[in-house]
Amino acid sequence: MIKIDLSATLGVLNDVSKLMLEESAAYAISCGESEILPAHLLLKSLENPFSDVRFILNKLEISHEELTALLLRGNQHSNIDILSRRRKNNPIVVGDAGVGKSALIEGLALRIVNKQVPPHLQNVELWSLDLASLQSGASIKGEFEKRLKAVIDFVKNSTTPIILFIDEAHTLIGAGGNEGGSDAANLLKPALARGELRTIAATTWTEYKKYVERDPALSRRFQLVKVDEPSIEESIVILRGLKPLYEKTHGVYITGEALETVTKLSARYIAAKKLPDKAIDILDTACARVSTAKNTPPKRLSYLDNKIHEINVAIDEFDRDYQLGESVDHSVKTKLENKLAELAEEKTALSTRFETQKALVDEILALREKLSDSEADYTEEERQQWINQLQGKKAEYEAIKPEECLIHAEVGRQQITAVIADLTGIPVNNMTGDELTKLTELPEILNDNIKGQSQAIEQIHKNLLTAMADLRRAGTPLGALLLVGPSGVGKTETAIQIAEHIFGGKQFLTAINMSEYQEKHTVSRLIGSPPGYVGYGEGGLLTEAIRQKPYSIVLLDEVEKAHPDVLNLFYQAFDKGELADGEGRLIDCKNILFMLTSNCGFDAANDRFAVKSDEELRRSLLSFFKPALLARMQIVQYHYLTTDVMKRIVKAKLTKLEKLVSERYKATFTIAENILEHIEKQCEADANGARLVDAILEGQLLPPLSLALLQRIAGGEKMSTITLNFEDGEYQVHIE
């Protein structure tokens, strides 16, 4: 006996099983039984086979809100022509993901409804085939074939002609192909060949070439219809059709400028996706943000609530300790109470500002809705009155300072650029005042950290100004700078400082040691392995870094040590702002600053302190770099560090050490002048630049200083004065 709790069981069954169980229960009741018997289930399973096409086929219907958008999509003449043929009348729509293949089919359904097709197509219905439902639970041998045959019979026997839409058609290959059975594609071929089944299939180019094109018997039964990515102008038209739908869904107002901005900027900055899909995604996100901000308290208000709670907890803890007779500092409580009052005042002001702006935005939206209602009954005088009110409210809203604005009255250019900036990390919107200040003051910042290279720094600054002002040649990266000079003069440090102050931090610097790429085959580590090789699909170090951080610096350190064939992949990156990875995808490099370092031509000892002319430097570089690659880069020469510059570097590093020790050990730390002179003499005899200073400090000066400090700490002795000098050929530490 099978006992089933019907109400509990129905919630976990699929539609077909649920239907069979319900009918079995009804049959049991009609037989006068109080329980469902195995016989009831068996009889009903025979009457209603699992291949019930009602759960496999879905009639393709379009909501009223989508009609306008579909009317504005490209024409469907190619599909109609193929469907009108006597033989091989099965189109397969092929295009990249996001270009609108499914929308094209829905547009065809709309044309059929509107009788905008030839007479023999006006009475047909479009049904979609759900391959997931077709395969679900079909593990028993022959079950899948039975279901698919039921679908074909349903289409053949329908009184109304049916055209079957198969989305993701490549999944037909191998679908249901259990041992001893056939896959869906092989089962459909005879019906397609005889004309018993008319279909429209859709898939992407990658899957079409990988699955459909490899099966000539299947591909010849379909006629290819190419769907290209729509142009920017066409995408704007599509978005205009979708605009009312998104306004209604999110309860926001979308400006015409927002539609143009989202289309143009997404086409420019988001290379991995296609129009119109990527533009629609960004517009949807911007609408959601504006709608959420209107109905959700600002983040600052939540932060203030948390801080107020923390301070209240601290005050309660203070009062408890005081009640228990513990020693407490009442000045601490006073500071907490003052801070609490300050935060409470800020919270009140912020809450008032939020409610005021929310009411103002609601009034603006209400007036816009009144004016846009074409069916409303109002006089011209009332309309003009509402227009005047709307203009007054908009003027009141626009008077709010940008930094004080908590709620947006519309989805405009500012909201779109903010979403793109968050998604890509690229500062699409105008640079803030702080960022502009850093950019204009960059030479001063770099000269403070990199001594004796003012000419090179000025050259780099000019390049960055042009790039950030977006006046560089279209399609090129932010820059391709070849920093050439002797070792230890600040080439790598320049890239680090620019990443820190302009790009937002060292995390936006991808440093690649090119000495690791001295073999030709190592190029696969940068761009990923090609098909058929180990590591295919895992991506490359360089290409994945650019994809994840499209606005950053790529530092190719010691580039002259790389194999020449490895450098060949940078031709297009420096010239066209594109780089193909091992999988054939084009990686967008237009917002990448490439910086290459090299000491090519500065190895000879007799060249020390010599300043090379541009022509001499170019001749040296041509001994390694190909002229075509060199022409794509801007050469920036770094000079040997003079004695005066070395003195400044040594003094700066010793001053930094003094500050560090004083702060760390709360003592007065003094470095004798003779140490400065000793290090300067050592540096004069070496051409390793500033690296030698670090080597002297870390290898000779810091060990005895560290030993003396640790011994003092181990003995539990206090330190008030620390003196470091150079006596009898070694560093001496005196601590009092």
Image (cartoon, helix red, strand yellow):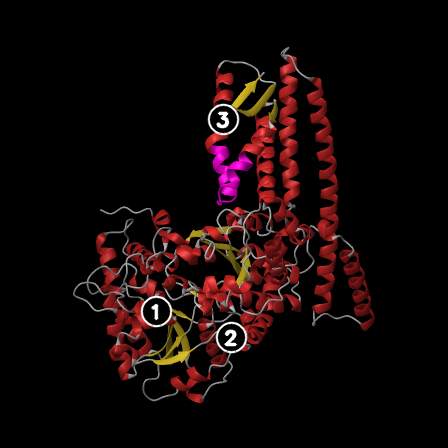
Q: Which image quadrant is residue 21 in?
A: bottom left
Nearer to the camera, 93 or 588: 588
> Is residue 681 one of those drawn in magenta?
yes
> Is residue 432 one of those drawn in magenta?
no
Q: Position of residue 178 (x, y in %)?
A: 21, 63
Q: Say what amino acid the circle numbered 1 marks.
A: Glu
Relative to 26, say whether 201 is above or below. Answer: below
The secondary structure that most of the magenta stretch takes on is helix
Residue appearing at x 71%, y 50% in the figure:
403
Q: Answer left or right for 218 relative to 542.
A: left
Mark 3 falls on what kind of element?
loop
Q: Position of residue 58 (x, y in %)?
A: 40, 69
| Residues rendered magenta in the picture | 679-698
For label 2, the residue is: 230
Tell me the number on the disc at residue 207.
1
Q: Residues within 10 Å of mark 2 (few under 14, many from 20)?
A: some
Mark 1 falls on what kind of element?
helix
- Sequence-first tag of 1 and 3: 1
Relative to 202, say whether 38 is above or below. Answer: above
Tell me the number on the disc at residue 579.
none
Q: Say what amino acid the circle numbered 3 marks.
A: Gly
Nearer to the camera, 80 or 517: 517
Q: Locate the C terminus and report the quarter of the image it occupies.
A: top right
